[in-house]
Amino acid sequence: MQWKITETNQVDPTATDRMGNKFLIGNGYIGYRGTLEEYGKDQKTATIVCGLYDKVGELWREPVNLPNGCFLQCISQDERLHAQNSRVLEHEQGLNLYQAVHERKTTFETASGAHITIRARRFASLARLPLICMEITLQADRDCQLTLQTGIDGDVWDLNGPHLRDITSSEQDGIISLSAVTHENGVPVAVSEMATFAMGTQSIIKGEKNILRAIQVPVRSNQACILYKFVAHATGLDSTDPLADSQRACREAAVLGFDRLMAEHCTLWAQRWAACDIQIEGDEPAQEALRFSMYALLAIAPVHADAVSIPARGLSGQVYKGAIFWDTEIFMLPFFSCAFPAIARNLLMYRYHTLEGARRKAREYGFRGAFYAWESQDGGEDACTLFNVTDVFTNRPLRTYFRDKQVHISADIVYAIWQYFTITGDQTIWADGGAEVVFECARFYLSYTYFNPDKQRYEILDVTGPDEYHERVHNNFFTNLMVAHTLSVCRDVAAYLQAQSPEKFRDLMASLDFEHDLSLIRQVSENIFLPVGEAAVDLAGVIPQFDGFFKLENISLPSLLERKLHPHEYLGGGNGLATTTQIIKQADVILALYLFKERYRVEIKSANWEYYEPRTEHGSTLSACSYSMVAAQIGKVDWAYRYFMKTATIDLTGEGKEYVGTLYIGGTHPAGNGGAWMAAIFGLCGISWEGQTLSIAPRLPTHWIQVTFPLVFQGQKLRLRLSNESVCVQIVEALETPLFISVEGAVQPLPLTGELSIPLVKERPG
Amino acid sequence: MQWKITETNQVDPTATDRMGNKFLIGNGYIGYRGTLEEYGKDQKTATIVCGLYDKVGELWREPVNLPNGCFLQCISQDERLHAQNSRVLEHEQGLNLYQAVHERKTTFETASGAHITIRARRFASLARLPLICMEITLQADRDCQLTLQTGIDGDVWDLNGPHLRDITSSEQDGIISLSAVTHENGVPVAVSEMATFAMGTQSIIKGEKNILRAIQVPVRSNQACILYKFVAHATGLDSTDPLADSQRACREAAVLGFDRLMAEHCTLWAQRWAACDIQIEGDEPAQEALRFSMYALLAIAPVHADAVSIPARGLSGQVYKGAIFWDTEIFMLPFFSCAFPAIARNLLMYRYHTLEGARRKAREYGFRGAFYAWESQDGGEDACTLFNVTDVFTNRPLRTYFRDKQVHISADIVYAIWQYFTITGDQTIWADGGAEVVFECARFYLSYTYFNPDKQRYEILDVTGPDEYHERVHNNFFTNLMVAHTLSVCRDVAAYLQAQSPEKFRDLMASLDFEHDLSLIRQVSENIFLPVGEAAVDLAGVIPQFDGFFKLENISLPSLLERKLHPHEYLGGGNGLATTTQIIKQADVILALYLFKERYRVEIKSANWEYYEPRTEHGSTLSACSYSMVAAQIGKVDWAYRYFMKTATIDLTGEGKEYVGTLYIGGTHPAGNGGAWMAAIFGLCGISWEGQTLSIAPRLPTHWIQVTFPLVFQGQKLRLRLSNESVCVQIVEALETPLFISVEGAVQPLPLTGELSIPLVKERPG
């Protein structure tokens, strides 16, 4: 079983960003980029703490990068051993996914010919969230005296910083600390470090922005010297005295020691893997990529709070302002809902806690209800600026309409809550805030929708759909479908809450003054315009992405790209090359067809997939998985597999876009990670559900022998084993409520215990 | 009395375009640019025939520039005397506005020291439309032998040509001709020339694209030699044999002779001036500019047909595709309606004749009724492309929304018909097509309008108002007001036609299937959303140009212009500098306040004028006159005068924009000419009307002693003499129906004959 991912000799500076993303460790509270111990701001070292934002002057508000407590520099006779500058004989860097431990091993040759090997392991403790634990092992091929500079480096990488002021260093009982406060709100932060080592002498060096220990270590030939570092982080978000709290955490860690800390950490990760691991027989690359994807999601999933969520670039830096996008609800949530319902609930509750911000945004634009932020930070404020891209030709900010017009975000949230509810059966979500969110989102659309008297239908005008290359369009199929769904869910939730908690329902209706709107919603929801597939022979069944889409220039993607005059020029915005063509950034109609897969026939899905696939740039990581899932449904398993692998390997290969206009957008792609899981489970494994019935329709690649994975459905633990020949459902714990299984159109009850195997006989579609 | 406008020594190539525009002659059938006789394509010589368009390949469809029959080159001993290349001692070029005659006089010094003077006069005969008549006088300070090359130059200036193929030259009975056919539709065209002269010998030279006579003229010292040229034009639009017809016209002209031709031409122009001339005592520059403006309009007004109209650049070339814009209806029509009702009717009938094209355009965009072309050519086809500007930074075409979103054009036409009707009282216009145009325009808006259920009102979404720097806005005040007016006029016209011609009404209702729509129009017209002035203290009474206007960046015009990186960069479009600011191209709210001046109080007009004036770039000639008229109404006479003069002198000074992006847009500005008339009569003289009552409220600049002008109101001829102290109305022909006059709020009947003088006593506003 393959749990380690490793890269060798990737010390070239051009690989640094990729390594930093790929080998990130985290526990949802902090994320630490996969940089090497001796790296600094130029190598984009970053310790991102979840939910802490700061704004400097008129620059973008973004996450705070804490001082780097994991810093360690080995010096041999004034020669600073640095993977990028020194002579490296051998280098290996990687992750143990099972343990969530980062590992590196580098052998340097010094100017004097000595071979010095540095090994380091580190993990962000899942048992003690503020803590990163490190073990550093030094070895040399001859006796030598080495100096280790280790401590806290406060001179950090920032996109729109610096965010920390009043940086103060201190030392107490062998613990060194760096304290500071953020610019905007003066939130105190502290990082403390405790180092333990068997031999050597140390002195403390205080710099303007750092505090380091210089440890003189006498190394004997081929004898390992081990140093442990315990780095604790604390902020004013959850501590009244971050300095003291971080010192205390260091002290406790040092007492427990590395091995015990590692053991408790690994135990928790093992439980995680037991709850979600997918085993693929017959495909090592897919196995690795899928595990990596799940690791990447788990490393950034908030377990400590329900007022935070997962940003679009996870905890890998400050890109996209550390904001939460629809990525979380549509592309990450399904994994959590099916394997870690409690985390899924945390993520959803973030939207309840930010409802007030969504109401403010709706009012700002003259609407009612909840218009959720396109880029949501703490409190639900929309961090998205009106000028979100810089023109490469004039170096001027470009007006974009992400903030104003991507109104589907509220519907995405409703979709996600409803999906969570249908998977988990968690009825408490409605009374705990879910219903209020749904009602307010529905109310927003009620105020956004226009009636076309001439065509006697409601239309959704002037929006931007998922495909951001076409801003300000009318009747975007995806958006209209999502809005209609929101209104319909609103009716269902109202009925449900009224039946289950009549008092809560009455209170909510009264406090929201929702009676009249609810009756309007009933009326409007049936009559939202939904474009249907074209009847024209050459477009039979193809749904226009928005009004007039087929009138746009019908150019091939390569021909469009040939028109580019600058490698980073933005294809959307006011004058972008794609805007006047049928080339789209990402799945739009196809995403809608996945989200509402039960409503559309295979022929319609096929026609649209074939039409839109060659016209899609996949300029967003949200794209490939949608094409994968619909490809699976229409029997194009080869394409389903290809797009699955594209999604699953995005942070392994580092092939994502790094620039839009002059804007740096690099980082990890958790939506891609979540999309990989969806493509595997919902796409290739063909999992879907309705009520108490789980449907399974495997469309596995032919080289996949068997796939095994756990699933929590309606709160009950199942284990599935699928091949293209049979489906097996194992009941992990005796069922408490009846569940059903639908395979090849036949529905039957699951046994209360044991397992049920069903052979597959029919031909699959396509 | 000043009737001549002259420029001396303007032979520098940089002045050529301006001269060409300023000194254009025309008779509505053909326009001939004010270039010199020896000029060719490089000097933008052009003979534009009204209503003849051609398209070559994928280039823009535009007017055809006919072969230049007015060409004449004087040669002295192999030295071609050319104002731009030869030694010029003295040069004068000008127009006699009263006669509509172009004059030039140039004294050359040849290499051998001879002084040769060429005088030339030419006019586009108003009595014989295909004809241009020329008189050329040669004089020298010594005996010499000159060669005159005169004839037809088919190598013409084209923006998107060449438009003529199969160019054939011929000679018959002393008449030389060039025939050709247009590219797109193979329309035959012909230009013939006949030259008469007292002495000399001639030979014919045939070139590939020209045919010339070489006339050897023995010139005696200080003795004038005169040559006459008669140039006739004919096209397949109105001739089955253009060659023969042009030859015949030449022959007839030669028989009549220059003097008789000039006499009949001048008689007709004298009648024109009698019908419209405005005499301003106390302001020679204003007098000249206003006369020039009227001349410029009359020179291009179609008198020969009602299926053509006046293009935005008149007959001065191919700019703006020779297309008819709303300029004609809103800015030129008032002059004609008040002085030449028959020409006004011709212009309006063009819209009836192109109704089918407007219906096609509505269908193309998914609407019903008549969506008139933004750039209307023959048949009402919209010549406007979707990419109307070229980006100066990338040299790529920019997507603009003139064609799609400037939906106010249909309402402008309705406004114009209604205005024509209220001025002239011409009741026949409704049954003759006017009602059908109005109904179909109203129907278009019925299908364009959305109902906002939340705000319980109809809204006009996604439009571009007059200010083209802000495309695709919602609830543009101007557009909403115009649409509401269209719907209201539709109701009135329906009622009117039903009362006057019940049978015609029944037929029209049936043929248009208009019963149901008319009832809807009644319902919608009362409930169109009209933004009102802001209540906020710093914006009290200021009407937002469109939804969200005040949220745009509030920058000063000079600061905005400082951001320009390229002198010709387009401020509108997708990313233009103005698009995200409150800087507007031209009068928008202010134009609406002029058009509906009776509906808004002086305080509102003042607040809006003060707000928008500094934010207006006046990047369109349609702008200044609106600011002038509203300035007059709010008592800012100095500003009214300043903007009046700006408008009235646009083609005299040649200060209009020459480029938008990389697009050449030079030419004459008939809307500016019309706007000057409006600013003088409607603005400074304060003329307005309602029913049978003419209101007069002079706000003359203090240095104007008196203004006198004729006016046809309700078909009856009046002559007005106004000062700031009194108003005098002279009844030119005994009244057949009663008329009233309103001065300073007092309404009284006009006498049936004689004149009525009323002293002004009250203070004027402001």
Image (spheres, coloured by chain):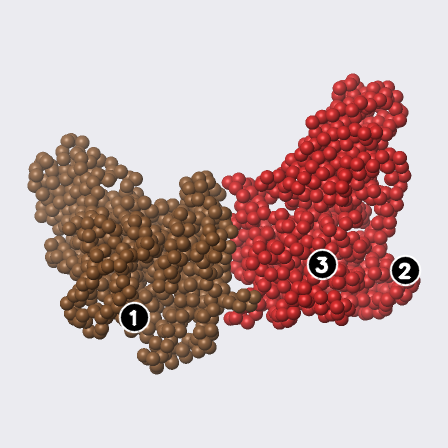
Chain colours: A brown, B red
Binning the other alpha carbons within 10 Å of mark 1 as few (below 14), some (14 to 19) or many (20 upward) gives: few
Residue A387 appearing in the image: no
Give the side of residue A99 with respect to residue A584, left or right.
left
User: Residue B674: where, in percent of width, then height?
Assistant: 74, 51
The chain ID associated with circle 1 is A
For disc 1, the marked residue is A691
For disc 3, the marked residue is B416
Which numbered marker is on residue B733? 2
User: Residue A707: where, in percent of width, then height?
Assistant: 20, 56
User: Residue A54: where, in percent of width, then height?
Assistant: 35, 56
Q: Residue furthest front?
A: A762
The chain ID associated with circle 2 is B
Give the CA separation, mark 1 to mark 2.
89 Å
Local secondary structure at mark 2: loop
Residue at (42%, 44%) from the top-left corner? Answer: A557
Local secondary structure at mark 1: loop
Q: What is the three-letter code of the residue carrying label 1?
A: Gly
User: Looking at the image, which is closer to me, B54 or B70?
Assistant: B54
Foreground tag (3 vs 1): 1
Q: What is the three-letter code of the residue carrying label 3?
A: Ala
The chain ID associated with circle 3 is B
Residue at (86%, 23%) from the top-left corner? Answer: B200
Is residue A328 positioned above or below B187 on the image?
A: below
Is residue B415 positioned above or below B384 on the image?
A: below
Q: Quadrant of the C terminus of chain A?
A: bottom left
Give the side of residue B670 with respect to residue B259, left or right.
left
Is residue A389 positioned above or below A364 on the image?
A: above
Residue A157 appearing in the image: yes
